[in-house]
Image (cartoon, grey):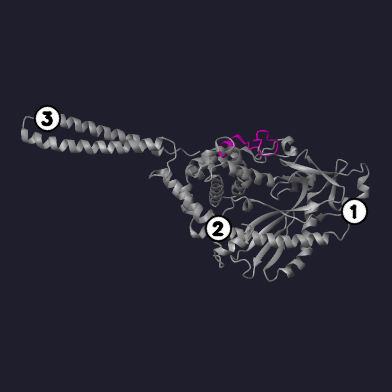
Amino acid sequence: MAARAPEPRAFWPLLTCVCTALLCLCQALGGRAAADGEEEEGAAEAGSVPLLKGSALLLLGCLLARCCGAAGGGPRPGGGWGPSAARRGALESFHARQLRLSPHVLGHSKAHVGRVVAELVRAAKAQGLQPGPLALSLRGDFVRIGSAYEQHKVRSPDRFDVLVPLRLPPRLQPEPLRAAGPAPSGAFVCALRAPAGAGWPRRYRPFVEGFCEELQGRCHLSSALVLRWFQGHLQRCLGAVRYRLQERCRISLAAGPGRPPTLHIRPCSDYVCCHISMAVRLIPAIPLGDALYLTALPPDVPPAGPAHGAMWGLNASRHEQRLLAWLKEQAPASSCHLKCLQLLKGLRDLRGQGLEEPFCSQWGRVLSSYVLKTALFSLMLRGPLDAWDERFLVERLEDLVMYLRDCLRKQTLMDFFLGNTSLPEAVALPRFLKEAAPVNLLAAFDGPTLDLAAFQLLYTWSQAPHLIRTYGSTRYLRPAPAACQHGANTRQELPGE
């Protein structure tokens, strides 16, 4: 590990000692002038020594005030002229130029995404009712999730995530169980049960053959088969929707093996005044009740045995949104917690541009947005929420970096919702989450990778102004959204803002 640079604050006590020595020298010169026998020279020196002494005293006072301010530890509203003020200036500029989104542009984007996705889901639901009751179908609604709807999205509002809940055949209920054996951390399998008891698979044979896998003599819903059906089903419905929306935008659906389909929306008229091309990831979800869903595991999760296609991940995005809303109510009106999350995501992305493979890909996975958000939740509930006032931005961001550093060194960061019994009573969680076994979000990474990530995280924080200057030039920036052509009056027409 590189040697630690000396603290900049050590310079000020040293300079204060030098000035104190200068003051003592002035005092000695004054005594020597008073003992001199010649009146004219004594008068001249008596007039010059107090001037020198006064200047030294003034300089000493300024240095003492500066030294005390640097060592006091408390944030100063309005900043100052030291290194922390320069760091804050660089972070504020970085946030304003590259990270912060226009609420107006984001509102237009969310409203347009909502209208297009609603059309597609409506068409897919209508077509899904035709095959009969013993098949999957869409429930008819969708759930907005992700940073765009949690007010901490960065850069451009051109990517969105949407859960599309599915409906199982009548009287068939999902039963999530923690995956056993070689399985990713936090993975579940979805068993199925019906009130009829034994023998139900024979009565649901078309559904079992199309969407289930047999594990240990029992039918389990296959995430791979459900995802493949979902992709084909939406693709078949796209034609009718494309015709209805042809005056507003052009839409297409991109699907790959093991990945949720992505809906691409390219405005072709003045319907969306900001003219942003958007990509919407449509994620099929199995509802469990209590705002919980099962979704297919992310494609970057390594396979874990032949049963990997039957494994699911648990999605508690609605509870994350509720927790963020509660924290916003409890924290000061000028709280900087979401701004800290945005800045940390932005610094992570900047540092990733200077890393080489294979660690570059690991860097983004270790410090995923969910990991950063989990660390923020845990840190905020440790101390008083008043400390997250905007005045303390640099201090709280440094606390978040150090907390993450410690988690990486210990190789432990527990999921905030699964098995967490220390949540405030005001944050009500379903019984399933409270009784679930805790999950370590860093369990999938080896020790050397986490140690290197901890080192790079500290380097990123210590060199944040330099990284911003290096990778904050125009050639690294994504194109900014076009200016709105309708003016501020259109804001009142958009419920999505």
**Residue 139 visible in image:** yes
Residue 34 has which mark?
Answer: 3
Note whether 77 is above or below 259 in the view shown.
above
Q: Position of residue 21 (x, y in %)?
A: 25, 32
Residue 328 found in image quarter:
top right
Q: State yes or no: discs 2 and 1 in contact (Cβ < 8 Å).
A: no
Residue 206 has which mark?
Answer: 1
What is the secondary structure assignment of the residue under circle 2?
Answer: loop
Q: Is residue 22 left or right of residue 493?
A: left
Note whether 291 is above or below 490 in the view shown.
above
Give the distance between the C-alpha atoms of the residues marked 2 and 3, in whole angstroms.
71 Å
Q: Which residues are magenta?
A: 404-425
Q: Position of residue 242 (x, y in %)?
A: 73, 68
What is the secondary structure assignment of the residue under circle 1?
Answer: helix
Write the residue at 91% across / 51% down.
205
The disc labelled 3 sits on which kind of residue?
Answer: Ala
Q: Position of residue 86 (x, y in %)?
A: 42, 47
Which is the main secondary structure of the residues drawn in magenta? loop
The disc, 2 or 3, on the residue closer to the chain's N-terminal end is: 3
Q: Is residue 12 magenta?
A: no
Q: Which residue is mark 2?
A: 102
The disc labelled 2 sits on which kind of residue?
Answer: Ser
* Classed neighbour count for the residue bearing mark 2: other residues with Cα under 10 Å, few (<14), some (14–19), many (≥20): few
Q: Is residue 210 left or right of residue 406?
A: right
The disc, 2 or 1, on the residue closer to the chain's N-terminal end is: 2
Between circles 2 and 3, the one closer to the viewer is: 2
Between circles 2 and 1, the one closer to the viewer is: 2
Residue closest to the eye, 116 or 189:
116
Q: Is residue 340 left or right of residue 447?
A: left
Residue 153 has which mark?
Answer: none
**Residue 466 visible in image:** no
Write the residue at 86% across / 47% down.
172
